[in-house]
Image: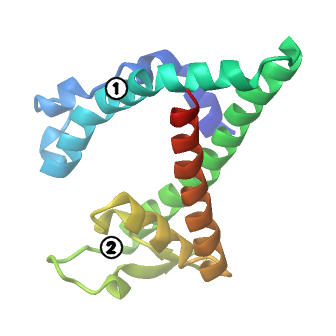
């Protein structure tokens, strides 16, 4: 609940935040690594560019598949349901990621040099197996590593691969349909 309230309270501010002062060295900039600084410099602009580039395809596709639907069906099916599902997804996995990172910090888990075995990044916090996700270099590695701490991790991984393939096929179909 607190995370959702924070999100709504600072939505506009965070939408335009590129961490310029932190990158310039203010607010304990020395605590940030080069990769964190680079990521913060490019993330917001990348996200804007992503939506600007996809907007014509998505808008045209939604207009074509919404033909004959009521305004209520359009708003619920294309705006409310996807937004709610995205919020639920980000709340759950964002919370899991924060729990793992903060627990790893409290346990003193260090990433170690490149090539370190990922099993060294595992510890226990409040009776739960946790993993220091920031030790992984790529986002997809973090995602699948997160699944390893879940029960039925292989099934969840297979469902994720199916979901990603479905996403790309649907995106391709949407682009060719337009």
CA separation in Å, label 1 and label 2: 38 Å
Q: Position of residue 33 (x, y in %)?
A: 16, 51
Helix, strand or loop at disc 2?
A: loop
Mark sitting earlier along the chain (1/2): 1
The answer to whether 107 is drawn above or below residue 62 in the figure is: below
Tag count? 2
Q: How is the image coloured?
A: rainbow
Q: Is 27 on the left or on the right of 62, as rendered?
A: left
Label 1: how many Cα within 10 Å (few below 14, some 14–19, many 20+) = few
The answer to whether 172 is drawn above or below residue 115 in the figure is: above
The residue under the point 44% across, 81% down is 123
Nearer to us in this view, 113 or 108: 113
Quarter occupied by residue 112: bottom left
Q: Position of residue 26 (x, y in %)?
A: 15, 29
User: In the orientation shown, which residue stands out farthest toward the top?
Assistant: 71
Q: Is residue 33 visible?
A: no
Q: Is residue 147 visible?
A: yes
Quarter occupied by residue 159: bottom right
The residue under the point 33% across, 82% down is 118
Q: Which residue is mark 2?
A: 108
Q: Which residue is mark 1?
A: 49
Q: Position of residue 47 (x, y in %)?
A: 38, 31
Q: Is 143 on the left or on the right of 44, as rendered?
A: right
The residue under the point 57% across, 41% down is 173
Q: Quadrant of the C terminus?
A: top right
The answer to whether 12 is drawn above or below residue 145 in the figure is: above
Q: Quadrant of the N terminus?
A: top right
Q: Nearer the viewer, mark 1 or mark 2?
A: 1
Q: Is 156 on the left or on the right of 100, as rendered?
A: right
Helix, strand or loop at disc 1?
A: helix
Q: Position of residue 153 (x, y in %)?
A: 61, 79
Q: Is 91 on the left or on the right of 16, as rendered?
A: right
């Amino acid at each position: 609940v607190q995370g959702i309230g924070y999100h709504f309270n600072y939505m506009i501010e965070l939408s335009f935040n590129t961490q310029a002062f932190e990158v310039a060295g203010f607010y304990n900039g020395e605590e940030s690594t080069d990769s964190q600084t680079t990521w913060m410099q490019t993330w917001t602009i990348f996200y804007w560019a992503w939506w600007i580039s996809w907007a014509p395809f998505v808008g045209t596709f939604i207009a074509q598949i919404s033909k004959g639907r009521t305004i209520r069906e359009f708003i619920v099916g294309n705006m409310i349901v996807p937004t709610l599902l995205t919020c639920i997804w980000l709340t759950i996995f964002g919370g899991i990621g924060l729990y793992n990172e903060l627990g790893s910090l409290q346990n003193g888990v260090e990433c170690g040099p490149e090539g370190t075995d990922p099993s060294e990044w595992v510890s226990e916090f409040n009776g739960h197996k946790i993993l220091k996700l920031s030790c992984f270099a790529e986002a997809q590695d973090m995602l699948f590593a997160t699944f390893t701490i879940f029960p039925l991790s292989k099934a969840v991984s297979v469902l994720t691969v199916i979901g990603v393939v479905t996403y790309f096929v649907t995106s391709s179909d949407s682009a060719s349909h337009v």
